[in-house]
Image (spheres, rainbow, N blue to C red):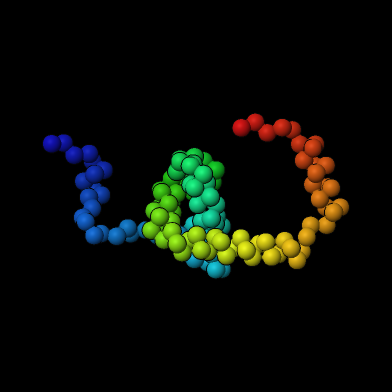
Amino acid sequence: MPVCEGCRKTKLKVGVTMDREFVERRDGSFYFMGSRVPLAHLVREFQQGESPEAIRSHYSTLSLEQVYGAITFYLGHKNEVESDIAEREREEDEVTKTHPTPPDLKEKFERMRQQMPARRD
């Protein structure tokens, strides 16, 4: 039976762990290793049904391998990751409550939004 050239080089045995890490904990949150992209962004898109390929297209600095690796990490550490995301959201809500956006800045953003051409998806 013919074996693909790449398959010979990457034959894995049961129980062998991945030799690359795709996610790291930094500043109390999970991020893609060596990147500023938070894992929470990938998780949100993954939960909304986005494919790994679609997620990859949104982040030019990430490889498809990194996206699949991060999804694998998320699925293996789901409770920990979701708990971390919930904590970050609580912190963001608290900051928003204690430091509201000034009304004049909101107006400026709204004017800018209205001046921007419509986005095509």
Residue 24 in sight in this render = no
Q: Nearer the viewer, residue 95 or 22?
A: 95
Residue lying at 69% horizontally and 65% vertically, measured from the top left: 94
Residue lying at 23% horizontally and 53% vertically, measured from the top left: 12
Residue 49 in sight in this render = yes
Rendered location of residue 100, percent (x, y):
78, 60
Q: Quadrant of the C terminus?
A: top right
Rendered location of residue 17, percent (x, y):
29, 60
Residue lying at 50% horizontally and 60% vertically, measured from the top left: 82
53 w.r.t. 66: above or below: above
Q: Quadrant of the N terminus?
A: top left
Residue lying at 32% horizontally and 58% vertically, measured from the top left: 18
Q: Where is residue 76, by image quadrant? A: bottom left
Looking at the image, the residue that sits furthest to the right is: 104
Q: Nearer the viewer, residue 61 or 84?
A: 84
Q: Where is residue 6, by image quadrant? A: top left
Q: Is residue 45 left or right of residue 6?
A: right
Looking at the rendered structure, the number of numbered marks drawn on it comes to 0
Rendered location of residue 86, percent (x, y):
56, 61
Q: Is residue 67 left or right of residue 116?
A: left
Q: Nearer the viewer, residue 75 or 27?
A: 75
